[in-house]
């Protein structure tokens, strides 16, 4: 029996429910001009320490949040369906959900 294939397209909104800020939303990361500057190659080269502090803060926050119901539901569907997740997220919450 061939399993039905389901494709999920996700972005920052799915992880916002877990407590991660989006980048472009109302209170997104890029509303903070300093953070926007620090997320650039120029900042990595010219202000390495502050750039690393910015990314370390992001990694610390990621360690404090967990997959939400949407992440878990998608993982659960893999029991009955062939599931592909296409996402721009780099937060690993889909993987952590299973």
Image: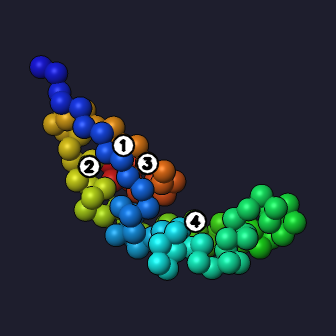
In the rendered structure, are the residues bearing label 1 and label 3 in contact, judged by CB atoms less than 8 Å apart?
yes
How far, Cα to Cα, is label 1 from label 2? Answer: 8 Å
From the image, state whether disc 3 or disc 2 is nearer to you: 3
Residue located 47% across and 78% down the image:
26
- The residue beneath circle 3 is 87
In the rendered structure, are the residues bearing label 4 and label 1 in contact, judged by CB atoms less than 8 Å apart?
no
In the rendered structure, are the residues bearing label 3 and label 2 in contact, judged by CB atoms less than 8 Å apart?
no
In the rendered structure, are the residues bearing label 1 and label 2 in contact, judged by CB atoms less than 8 Å apart?
yes
In the rendered structure, are the residues bearing label 2 and label 4 in contact, judged by CB atoms less than 8 Å apart?
no
For marks 2 and 4, the one nearer the N-term is 4
For marks 4 and 3, the one nearer the N-term is 4
- The residue beneath circle 1 is 85
How far, Cα to Cα, is label 4 from label 3? Answer: 18 Å
Q: Relative to residue 40, is residue 3 depicted above or below? A: above
- The residue beneath circle 4 is 59
How far, Cα to Cα, is label 4 from label 1? Answer: 22 Å
**Percent position of residue 59, x then y:** 57, 65
How far, Cα to Cα, is label 3 from label 2? Answer: 12 Å
**Percent position of residue 16, x then y:** 39, 69
Residue located 27% across and 58% down the image:
70
Residue 74's tag is 2
Identify the secondary structure beneath mark 3.
Answer: strand
């Amino acid at each position: 029996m061939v399993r039905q294939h389901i494709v999920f397209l996700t972005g920052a909104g799915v992880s916002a429910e877990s407590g991660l800020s989006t980048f472009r939303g109302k209170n997104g990361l890029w509303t903070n001009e300093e953070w926007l500057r620090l997320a650039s190659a120029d900042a990595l080269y010219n202000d390495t320490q502050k750039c690393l502090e910015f990314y370390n803060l992001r990694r610390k926050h990621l360690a404090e949040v967990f997959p939400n119901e949407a992440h878990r539901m998608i993982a659960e569907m893999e029991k009955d369906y062939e599931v592909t997740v296409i996402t721009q997220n780099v937060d690993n919450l889909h993987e952590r959900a299973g």
